[in-house]
Amino acid sequence: MIYWNSLSDFLAMGGYGLYVWGSFGVNVLIMAVEPIVVARNQKATKARLKRQIRAESRSGD
């Protein structure tokens, strides 16, 4: 088990702090942005499908 003597030792992570905390930060950012991107894509896809269905129903008459 690893023990740290201070908060700065913990944040430094034995010299790998930038990598560890940078990776953690990127993960948090992606997990926060992903639902927003999915919701936007879902809305755009639904709108596109509605337009396509309307166009096909007009041409089928």
Image: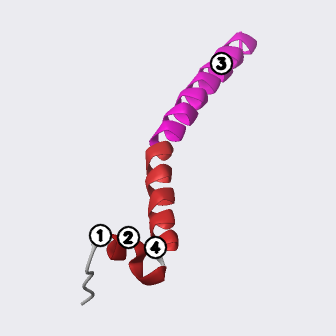
Name the secondary structure under disc 3.
Answer: helix
Which of the two labelled residues, at mark 3 and mark 1, occupies the earlier sequence position? 1
Q: Nearer the viewer, residue 21 or 15?
A: 15
Q: Secondary structure at mark 1?
A: helix
Whether 9 is drawn above or below 28: the answer is below
Name the kind of residue labelled 4 in the image: Gly
In the displayed structure, does residue 33 sit left or right of residue 61? Answer: left
The answer to whether 7 is drawn above or below residue 13 in the figure is: above
Q: Earlier in the sequence, mark 3 or mark 4?
A: 4
Q: Are marks 2 and 4 in contact (CB under 8 Å)?
A: yes
Q: Which residue is located at x 51 percent, y 70 percent?
A: 18
Kind of residue at disc 1: Leu
Query: Which stretch did the figure color magenta?
Result: 35-61
Quadrant location, the N terminus: bottom left
Between tags 3 and 1, which lies in front?
A: 1
Q: How is the image coloured?
A: secondary structure
Are the two marked residues, 3 and 4, in contact with CB atoms closer than 8 angstroms? Answer: no
Amino acid type of the residue that numbered disc 3 sits on in the rendered structure: Arg
**Residue designated by label 1:** 7
Residue at x-position 75% and y-position 14%: 59
Q: CA distance from mark 1 to mark 4?
A: 12 Å
Nearer the observer: mark 3 or 4; the answer is: 4
Residue that badge 2 annotates: 11
Location of residue 61 (image quadrant): top right
Q: Cα distance, mark 1 to mark 2? A: 6 Å
